[in-house]
Image (cartoon, rainbow, N blue to C red):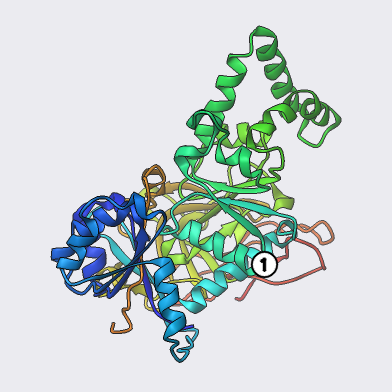
Amino acid sequence: MQGITFATAYDSLGEEGLEHSLNEPEVYGLFTNAALLKTVAGVAEKTPTVKVVIYDGNKADVKAGAIDQLERNGSRVYHLDDFLELGQAHPAEPNLPEPDDTACIMYTSGSTGAPKGVLLSNKNIVASVAGVERLLGELLTPDATFLAYLPLAHIFELAVEMTLVSVGITMGYGQVKTLTDNSVRNCVGDIRAFKPSIMIGVPAVWELIRKGIVAKVSGGGRVTQTAFNVAYAAKKLFGSKSIVGLVADAVVFNKIKQATGGRLKYAVNGGAPVSRETQEFITLAVTDMIMGYGMTESTALSCILPFSMLEYGTVGVPSPAVEVKLVDFEEAGYHATNNPPQGEILIRGATISKGYFKRDDLTKEAFTDDGWLMTGDIGQWNANGTLSIIDRKKVSGGSESHLECVCGSVGLLTLAAVSVFVEPCQAFRRRVHCPRAPRVDLQVLPRCGQHRCPCLVRRQQAHGCKPPVAGCLC
């Protein structure tokens, strides 16, 4: 273990974005795959700090001239197998990381300008993993399997994989372009081949799956279409767990579920909001869909919808690792005193980034002096303690997610960046409904002082049931 900081970049950002992601952190070593070596070689002359390039995959996939071009510009190029052998022959003393050391500089494209490098510490990542385990631990069983296919350079995929590795869940790797049967020829898609029990995705992927199901139903004739429509309407009316819903599954939907391998127990949406219609379709026809909310600056999931609270239109409850509050946005009439409370979402806690690499100006725009991340998203607290995203401020804040665009990319670059060379607010109280405790309605609290508001949402175990009750620190 060497505790080396790594950075990330997408090949879809173009040469200019790739150059920036290599030059700003003064990358020394780079890891990618055989098919992307030519892309790396294309910026070699303009990225002088890159001295070591490691790639995996089939050597036959390396495009002609890529290695020669890299070597001419001063880089040593190794296949991963050869590099591992080199390490075994020349062992190095461990350089153990500290909690506050920067683990990752994750480049995110944002909405305009050059990619921004979000600083994520070891503590940020561990806290994110712990929060997911706390809220979804009952679903992370030893027999679970996970199909990974989104770019690992995106915080959503990285956080999920870190969580599943930490609990020992088997993972398989696929690609967006070979995900479903409709995407391949003369073989089955990755989902049906691997038969995952857990799957994450972005709205574009769920739409791909929905369209595949609709196409198959439409091609099955009038009887098949009628059976599907009746079963769908009945399950929607009576509920998934009702006798009618179970019969609809047995007669109609279990056949459809075979398109995802037949073992899928739940799906998690992230990266961008999914429409209620798509969420409802996936939930009724395929499997229950869990919603989440977060961004690179919050190390992915700041909120997640526990399995015991499944519903449409919310992103769940805060992770135990963070505090969440809403701040008035006067221009649009969003106030914490509204009923229900509304305002810009601010997040603080162990998962929140220290800021942007070499960009103090952007850090000051997105983070308060006392550690709150100003997301730019407008939220609403619901009566049961869940959070809904209802709007977006047109100002700087947390980075926008562009995973929908890059998930269709051929590949990604994961960069080993040796950068070790390198206002007053209206607050409120809310409680998550607990069946063993009296329900507490939302209560608006008075202004909590000049420039500090200690009235924060903090999760705590109570009454021995899930989800735990949220309290107030006023």
Which residue is at 67% across, 38% downward? 261
Query: Residue 345, position in %: x, y?
Result: 46, 59
Q: Residues within 10 Å of mark 1 (few under 14, many from 20)?
A: some
Q: In this view, does 170 lie above or below 267?
A: below
Tell me if residue 274 comes above or below residue 221 in the rendering: below
Q: In which quarter of the image is residue 412?
A: bottom left
What residue is drawn where x is 77% and y is 70%?
462
* Nearest the eye: 292 or 214: 214
Q: Is residue 367 visible?
A: no
Q: Position of residue 88 (x, y in %)?
A: 47, 81
The reply, left or right, for residue 42 in relation to residue 393 is left
Up the image or down, 116 lies above or below 210; here it is below
- Mark 1 belongs to which amino acid? Val
Tell which of 341 and 259 is nearer to you.
259
Give coordinates of residue 389: x percent, y percent.
50, 49
Residue at coordinates 68% horizontally, 33% vertically from top-left?
257
Judged left or right of residue 159, residue 408 is left
Asked which quadrant contains residue 107, the reply is bottom left
Occupied quadrant, residue 306: bottom right
Which SS class for mark 1?
helix
- Which residue corresponds to mark 1? 167
Q: Is residue 365 left or right of residue 251?
A: left
